[in-house]
Image (spheres, helix red, strand yellow):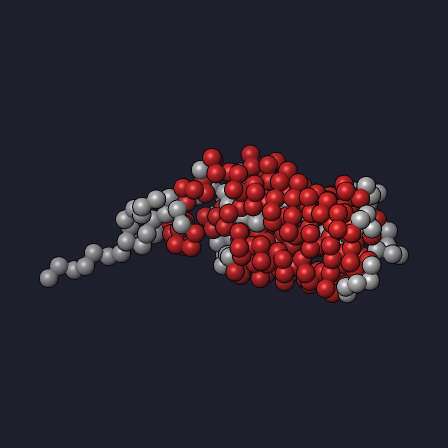
Amino acid sequence: MAAASPTPLLSHEQRALYRRWLAFGSPAEFRDPRLGYRRLFSELLGTFMLVLVAAGGGLLHGKGEVSLAAAVVAPALMVLAIILFMGAISGAHLNPVVSLAFALRGDFPWGRVPWYVLAQLLGASIACLFLLGVFGNVEHLGATLPGPGYRAWQALLMEIALTGGLVSVILGTASAAQNVGTIGALGVGAYIALAGLWAAPVSGTSMNPARSFGPALVSGDWHAYWVYVVGPLVGAAIAVGCAWILRGAGGDAAARMAASGRLERPVPPDGEEMAG
């Protein structure tokens, strides 16, 4: 009796791609440039939802209608939900420095970065126009500003440290060394809540130039916006350096998929090509 043929050994990338296919369907749709509008709409919608909750919570906290804890935990829960329900479409970056960090790691195409950033800034601006229509131009529309008694340089240092931690969590949970999807959503959401609970009085815990851009643009208050551009950029660069030390160069299959970058055709466990 002839021995059964052994199951072909699959590369890590093939296994990751196959798992992705099982979860989200044909990869052809994800890499088709004609469907790029789906990624951009996902980033616009996701950033709109994030900034609506983050800036809206800040606005209502400033009016004394919600607690600080509620104002900082609400956007964390929103990010968790966004990652779960449409992270597979665009990667749910929701943040220009996250897109830049993925690109620096080789997990996301540089050509898509400007479009992602534009979609994120537009989503944030629409959210703040909505808040303006509902509440009027009060409490700086929930803008992130250095807290009372803190100077800009203190808020800057806090944003550097907090963004470094946030981007480290995102890159780590998106790598092949960790599970992606639910674990990533929980990790990122938990980090945002934790950072806000202890550091919001110092800088407002933006960690996101788009989140700060919307309120600044619509309210017209730009006086501290530079803190929330420079701080996250420096923090993200530090996180990319830490990721290189911890895990070496980027570009593994799981990270590319988490960032919604280039996808390859999956191979099933029996080695036969799957239908697209």
Residue at the limit of the structure toward the left, as seen here? 1
Residue 160 in picture, x, y percent from top left: 73, 50
Q: Residue at x 81, y 47 (%)?
A: 137
For the question of whether residue 100 can be seen, the reply is no
Q: Residue at x 59, y 36 (%)?
A: 115
Compared across the picture, whether 85 is left or right of 12 comes to right
Comparing 169 with 81, the one in front is 81
Residue 7 in picture, x, y percent from top left: 27, 56
For the question of whether residue 122 can be seen, the reply is yes
Q: Residue at x 65, y 44 (%)?
A: 123
Quadrant containing the C terminus is top left
**Above or below, comparing residue 3 to residue 109 in the picture:** below
Q: Residue at x 52, y 42 (%)?
A: 38
Quadrant containing the N terminus is bottom left
Residue 47 in picture, x, y percent from top left: 64, 48
Residue at the limit of the structure toward the front, as seen here? 134
Residue 8 in picture, x, y percent from top left: 28, 53
Q: Exactly how many numbered labels are in the figure?
A: 0
